[in-house]
Image: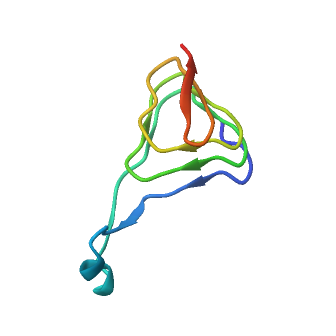
Amino acid sequence: MIGPNTHIYTSCHSLDSNERLLDVEFGKPVTIGKNVWIGGNCTILPGVTIRDNAVIGAGSVVTKDIPNDSIAIGNPARIKQK
């Protein structure tokens, strides 16, 4: 389940300023496991994996992988419960 106004981003740009001037862009996959619940107004950044049975609290910004059976909340999202 994915709540309203949640954004899942897969595109990235280089941290190198010269490459950004050349409009170098690339993608990183986002993987969402089974039975995941993502609250409204969340932001999921490129390259993140949210594993099975995880819950992401409303308004969270997911910058790192979330393990199985976890509840993550906040900006950046942190594991609050397993």
Marker count (numbered) = 0
Left/right of residue 25 with respect to residue 2 in the rendered view: left
Examine the rendered structure and indicate whether residue 12 appears above or below residue 25.
Answer: above
> Residue 17, position in %: x, y?
30, 78
Left/right of residue 60 with respect to residue 69 in the rendered view: right
Snapshot quadrant of residue 3: top right
Snapshot quadrant of residue 60: top right
> Residue 4, position in %: x, y?
74, 49
Colour convention: rainbow
Which residue is at a point 37% across and 51% down the rendered structure image? 29
Which residue is at a point 42% across and 47% down the rendered structure image? 30
Left/right of residue 82 with respect to residue 17 in the rendered view: right
Snapshot quadrant of residue 14: bottom left
Left/right of residue 67 with respect to residue 17 in the rendered view: right
Of residue 17 and residue 50, the one placed in the foreground of this image is 17
Q: Quadrant of the C terminus?
A: top right
User: Which residue, as the protein is rendered here, is positioned at the far top?
Assistant: 82
Which residue is at a point 60% across and 42% down the rendered structure image? 75
Q: Quadrant of the N terminus?
A: top right
User: Which residue, as the protein is rendered here, is positioned at the far bottom?
Assistant: 22
> Residue 59, position in %: x, y?
69, 44
Examine the rendered structure and indicate whether residue 46 appears above or below residue 50.
Answer: below
Examine the rendered structure and indicate whether residue 77 appears above or below residue 70.
Answer: below
> Residue 79, position in %: x, y?
53, 24
